[in-house]
Amino acid sequence: MNYDVIVVGAGPAGSTAAKCLAEKGITVLLLDKERFPRMKPCGGGIPINTVKRFSYLEDYDLIESFSYGGFIHSPSQKYSIELNEEKPIVAMISREKFDYGLVNIAVDSGTHFIDGEKIKDVHISKDNAQVVLHDGSSIESKMIVGADGVSSVVAKKSGLAPQQRRVNVCIFQEYPVEEKVIIEYATEQRLSHIHLMYYGIPGYA
Ligand SMILES: Cc1cc2nc3c(=O)[nH]c(=O)nc-3n(C[C@H](O)[C@H](O)[C@H](O)COP(=O)(O)OP(=O)(O)OC[C@H]3O[C@@H](n4cnc5c(N)ncnc54)[C@H](O)[C@@H]3O)c2cc1C
């Protein structure tokens, strides 16, 4: 047996699962098809209750800022709903840095991490569970955690979700802006502006 547990996918779910297992002395391999740090389309807003639940996040400098509210603008931009609280309601993160930070926390807890390794199949038997890598070789464990996202190979090949939903294409763009621009538009309270249609483009900005 190579490992007690193989976690496939090093997004927030996989890295957090790996950290929790490794802390208990369980031998864990965390695998991801991408090379880290990697980008992930995301609005970057984490509800404050999640930050409280995983309170160690604040020790690792993974949170860029806290937002105290904001505005949701209608597609015509004529209407908006405002929310402004005295305490922060959302933590803002950059997924490239955040996900890599969570991987490093898992590694610090004893996880063995391999990136750039895509799994193409899983074999589950009474005695063990194997992941099959892209080159056809396999790694053995007692258990596999499928944390490989919305198009999970683990879910498909293990039979947990053989029929996966058809998914749409998502185009995303992040723009770096200077701190003074952020303060001008979002204030010190980091008020978010959520546009449900932006210059005629459906989606949100
Ligand atoms: C446009 C957009 C905006 C979003 N905004 C927000 C937001 O503001 N706040 C929020 O909380 N959530 C947001 N989400 C949702 C959030 O991104 C997901 O809920 C979250 O990423 C799920 O985490 P996860 O760890 O389950 O999967 P993921 O983060 O998707 O990670 C899965 C990992 O598995 C790896 N993987 C996939 N297949 C394989 C394979 N075959 N072999 C090896 N590795 C594999 C991938 O490379 C990836 O790193 C947004 C999502 C989208 C699409």
Image (tube, helix red, strand yellow):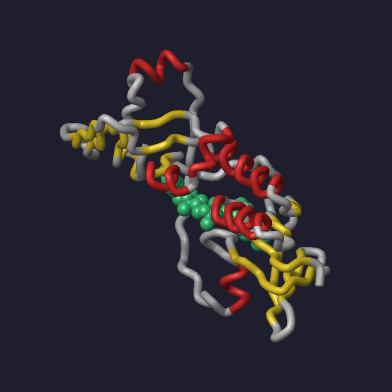
Residue that sits furthest to the front in the current view: 24
Q: Where does residue 45 sit, x and y in percent of width and height?
A: 41, 40
Q: Residue at x 28, y 32 (%)?
A: 70
177 or 203, nearer to the observer: 177
Residue that sits furthest to the bottom in the current view: 126
Quadrant of image for the N terminus: bottom right
Image position of 127 with respect to 5: above or below: below
Q: Where does residue 36 sit, x and y in percent of width and height?
A: 68, 43
Q: Where does residue 42 sit, x and y in percent of width and height?
A: 47, 43
164 or 52, nearer to the observer: 52
Quadrant of image for the C terminus: top left
Image position of 96 with respect to 131: above or below: above
Q: Residue at x 69, y 66 (%)?
A: 5
Total number of numbered discs in the rendering: 0
Q: Where does residue 57 sit, x and y in percent of width and height?
A: 53, 40
Image position of 13 with respect to 161: above or below: above
Residue that sits furthest to the left in the current view: 79
Q: Is residue 118 visible?
A: no
Q: Quadrant of residue 69?
A: top left
